[in-house]
Image (spheres, grey):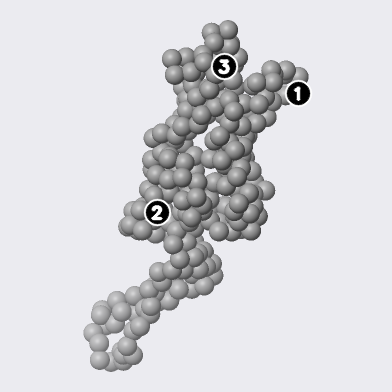
Amino acid sequence: MFVKIILKRSVHLPHSIRHQYQIYEKLFMQPSVAKVNISPFRKNFLPVVLYAVLLEKYYMKKLFLALLIAGLPIIINAQEDTSLVNRINAMLSFTQIKDLEKVIEYTYPKLFTIVPKETLIAAMKSAFESEDFIIELDSVKILKIFPIFKINDTSYVKVRHTMLMKMKYIDPYDSTQKEQKEFMASLMTQKFGEGNVRFDPVANSLNIFMTPDMVGIKYNSSKWTFANLNEDNPQMLNMLFGKQVLVKLKEYK
């Protein structure tokens, strides 16, 4: 999940911390219609109650189709879509082991019309391969899958997952830098919440627990692909999704 922390100009940060934030920003600033097929029937040949039931079902199906045509969201139980769950698990698994080429295969293709695929891979690699840190990811697992909704021919779903990012310093731990590292941890706490960021002097790493959101997208019979739901970057979201989609996604907290 892409994250951006804005510091006031009056705050003077050592070069090492500013460089750490540049790395940090690179890493996080970027992400069935039922057919109506009712045989003709005549009212005179059916009992009144049965006729009423069939008529109600007929018009309910007509209404269902009309809602789809109008582009209104239709809610579907996400847990019933095993292909979605399997694709999410695969995406998160490749994310944890940092197999970026595989992650790209699960990424929403529209993103590549904004940022070329090669540029995106290079940016992610440069973030993970810092001169100051070794980035390790752990506990990248599904936390919650919200209901699927459909607008026109495309299905969408909001997915929340967990992630523990360990930013391990390459240089050996120096107790004289403890204040700087704890200061950086306190700044990140403002974004991720109390108790979610801590500096581990034994492992010499800055550990950040987060629960990012992403969006699953499926067009007709295509496979599910995903994009980060980074609300700190509304310009990117507006380029990826229409207003109706974004409004619906905000309903799920």
Secondary element at image label 2? helix
Q: Which residue is mark 1?
A: 9
Is 4 above or below relative to 71?
A: above
- Mark 2 or mark 1, which has the lower sequence index? 1
In the displayed image of the protein, which residue is found farthest to the right? Answer: 10
Q: Which residue is mark 2?
A: 87
Q: CA distance from mark 3 to mark 2?
A: 37 Å
Residue shown at the point (47%, 41%) measured from the top left: 98
Judge by depth and name the residue closer to the eye, 231 or 16. 16
Image quadrant in which you'd find residue 110: bottom right
Q: Position of residue 215 (x, y in %)?
A: 50, 51
Q: Disc 2 vs disc 1: Cβ atoms closer than 8 Å?
A: no
Residue shown at the point (43%, 68%) measured from the top left: 221
Disc 3 versus disc 1: nearer the observer: 3
User: In the figure, is residue 177 to the left or right of 80?
Assistant: right
As drawn, the label of residue 246 is none
- Mark 3 or mark 2, which has the lower sequence index? 2
Image quadrant in which you'd find residue 50: bottom left
Residue shown at the point (39%, 49%) measured from the top left: 90
Q: Position of residue 125 (x, y in %)?
A: 56, 40
Report crowding for label 3: few under 14, some 14 to 19, many 20 or more residues within 10 A (C-alpha): some
As drawn, the label of residue 181 is 3
Disc 2 versus disc 1: nearer the observer: 2
User: In the figure, is residue 142 to the left or right of 191?
Assistant: left
Res. 45 visible in picture: yes
Q: Position of residue 143 (x, y in %)?
A: 39, 41
- Mark 3 or mark 1, which has the lower sequence index? 1
Residue shown at the point (26%, 79%) measured from the top left: 49
